[in-house]
Amino acid sequence: QKAPIRVLVTGAAGQIAYSLVNFIAKGDVFGTDQPLDLILLDIKLMMEVLGGVVMELKDCALPLLREIVATDDYEVAFKDIDVAFLVGAMPRKQGMERKDLLTANVTIFKGQGQALDKYAKKNVKVIVVGNPANTNALICSKYAPSIPKENFTAMTRLDQNRAMAQIAERLDCNVNDVNKVIIWGNHSATQYPDVRFATAVKNGATMIQKRGAAVIAARKLSSAMSAAKASCDHIKDWWFGTGDRWVSMAVPSDGSYGIKEGLVYSFPVICTGGDERKYKIVQGLKIDDFSRSKMDLSAKELEEEREMALSVCKD
Ligand code: NAI
């Protein structure tokens, strides 16, 4: 019997978490032989709602789920955690661009970076889902200097999954038959979904960048179930490895493909799994002029976001 791991979900009373906590607790991410403690963080105002989520989780009668902690206290939430799903943030509303959210969210992610630094395990794996996800991850890492930078990632897997699903639909094939779809850059409208290397693709035209807006228009709420699933895919692949599949993760740039070091930028990566749980950016891809301009545009946006974010943080 494996020792339980401690998994934190922030924004736990929100809509993404409502699907996510069930996926995690039933073994979709860490395997059906891995017991876990689930720590649920939200703001004070949401504690009653969160209490309802806890009741339902218990009512799911999930054998892997040990302790459930619902809290608004950072010390309790971040203490000794192995994995953090940082979902909590102000969500994007209809017609709102991600930049409007930046100022509000930077402060949250600074505080959570400090809490990670102080309380979490030093090998904690972090996925930031809350928008603007790439820059929130950068800020979080900045304020958690005792944790390796590469442990901070942001989610572009939903964009990858959307791309794969649309390609599979168009080609009338199974989504598993689609591989090597890349999301470059920011989780925003400047992201560059790159299908040049994709296998099982005939016509690469996709509408990935605006898919989030389409879901909002239809559902009157932002993507939640698919976002929760994507965050599980991201952490599962990081935890167990990808084999030779490529997956897109926003990770701190090491200068690959001319992207400034330190920007949290979505690259195609391969995860090693094992005890080390490393990821490597896929190297040596040929970048044509069109791709270059798209990739640079998203990098430029991220540089602007970084500047804006740092000016909010001051110290
Ligand atoms: P939601 O509004 O339903 O839930 C957010 C929850 O976070 C709320 O319960 C709120 O009280 C909580 N929260 C706010 N500040 C907090 C703090 N400081 N600590 C802990 N909890 C806090 O939003 P939803 O739909 O669950 O989305 C969450 C985030 O995920 C949004 O920022 C959204 O834009 C983002 N998102 C990112 C995607 C991606 O692909 N990277 C895809 C879809 C959504």
Image (cartoon, helix red, strand yellow):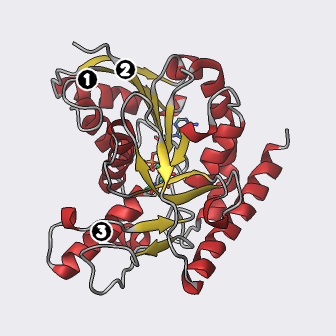
**Residue ID at (71%, 60%):** 260
SS type, badge 1: loop
Q: Nearer the viewer, residue 195 or 301?
A: 195
- The residue carrying pointer 1 sits among few (fewer than 14), some (14 to 19) or many (20 or more) residues within 10 Å by Cα, namely some
Amino acid type at circle 2 is Ile
In the picture of the structure, the residue carrying the numbered disc 2 is 5
Is 13 on the left-hand or right-hand side of 185? left
2 and 1 marks in contact (CB < 8 Å) = yes
**Is residue 192 visible from the viewing direction of this image?**
yes
- The verdict on label 1 being within 8 Å of ligand 1 is no
User: Where is residue 89 drawn, in percent x and y?
Assistant: 54, 46
In the picture of the structure, the residue carrying the numbered disc 3 is 164
- The residue carrying pointer 3 sits among few (fewer than 14), some (14 to 19) or many (20 or more) residues within 10 Å by Cα, namely many
Dot 1 or dot 3: first in sequence order is 1
SS type, badge 2: strand
**Residue ID at (38%, 30%):** 50
User: Where is residue 213 drawn, in percent x and y?
Assistant: 43, 71
Is 262 on the left-hand or right-hand side of 288? right
| Measured Cα–Cα span from mark 1 to mark 3 | 29 Å
Q: Which mark is residue 34?
A: 1
Amino acid type at circle 3 is Met
| Measured Cα–Cα span from mark 3 to mark 2 | 31 Å
| Measured Cα–Cα span from mark 2 to mark 1 | 8 Å
Amino acid type at circle 1 is Gln
**Residue ID at (40%, 64%):** 159
**Is residue 221 visible from the viewing direction of this image?**
no
Question: Which quarter shows the N terminus?
Answer: top left
Q: Nearer the viewer, residue 196 or 166?
A: 196
Q: Which residue is the extreme one toward the front?
A: 284
Q: Is residue 1 above or below residue 72?
A: above
